[in-house]
Amino acid sequence: MNAKHANTQALTHDYVDQAYTLAREANHALTLEEWRRFAIPLAAAQPTQMRAPGVILILRNDLVRGMAAFCWTHAPDGSRLLSARKIVIMDRARKELVAQELLAGLIEVALRDNCARVRAELPRSSTWLENRWSDPEGNIFRLPVECVRILPDESTSSDDKVVTLHVPMP
């Protein structure tokens, strides 16, 4: 694979342990066992089988560089939306490419599953990502993309220990 290109795929069992290293950057207290309890039930049999709830991966040079957990939910108006959370992007050289591919993958899943829009839960430290993804009217992307700011502790519960976080690179 060309180093300038990224590959989008569903989390598979082959990548559960490699994706842990990225999840651990977001939550240093996360153990491998906790990650496996979260990720294995969401792992797809094949890379092309993106299903909700699930985890989308962005690979570059066969290494996990970005990921997001996603599920369906309903908006107050009753429309279906794809909610992306636990978003982690870590690629010093190509973070914009990884972010672009991650959003494109989420939009593809949302379109396939008849969702009216994508909702991305972002930590307060992700202004750069909000600036690239926010499209509440759907003027830029094929679906509206709503970015919602959360506090780090809002994305953590006793059974869900992966924190949504963009890991800034030096």
Image (cartoon, rainbow, N blue to C red):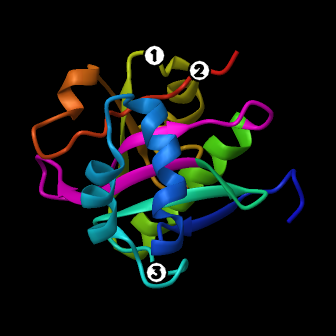
Q: Position of residue 71 (x, y in %)?
A: 27, 59
The residue where tag 2 is placed is 168
Give yes or no for contact between labels 2 and 1 (Cβ–Cβ under 8 Å): yes
Q: CA distance from mark 2 to mark 1?
A: 9 Å
The residue where tag 1 is placed is 125
Say if 140 sits above or below 36 in the image: above
- The reply to whether residue 80 is visible in this rendering is no
Say if 127 sits above or below 78 in the image: above
Q: Position of residue 163 (x, y in %)?
A: 32, 33
Q: CA distance from mark 2 to mark 3?
A: 30 Å
| In this view, the mark in front (2 or 1) | 2
The amino acid marked with disc number 1 is: Ser
The residue where tag 3 is placed is 49
User: Over which residues does the magenta segment extend?
Assistant: 66-94
Say if 65 sits above or below 129 in the image: below
**In this picture, residue 16 sits left or right of residue 129:** left
Q: Name the secondary structure under disc 1.
A: loop
**In this picture, residue 102 sits left or right of residue 138:** right
> Quarter holding the C terminus?
top right
- The reply to whether residue 28 is visible in this rendering is yes
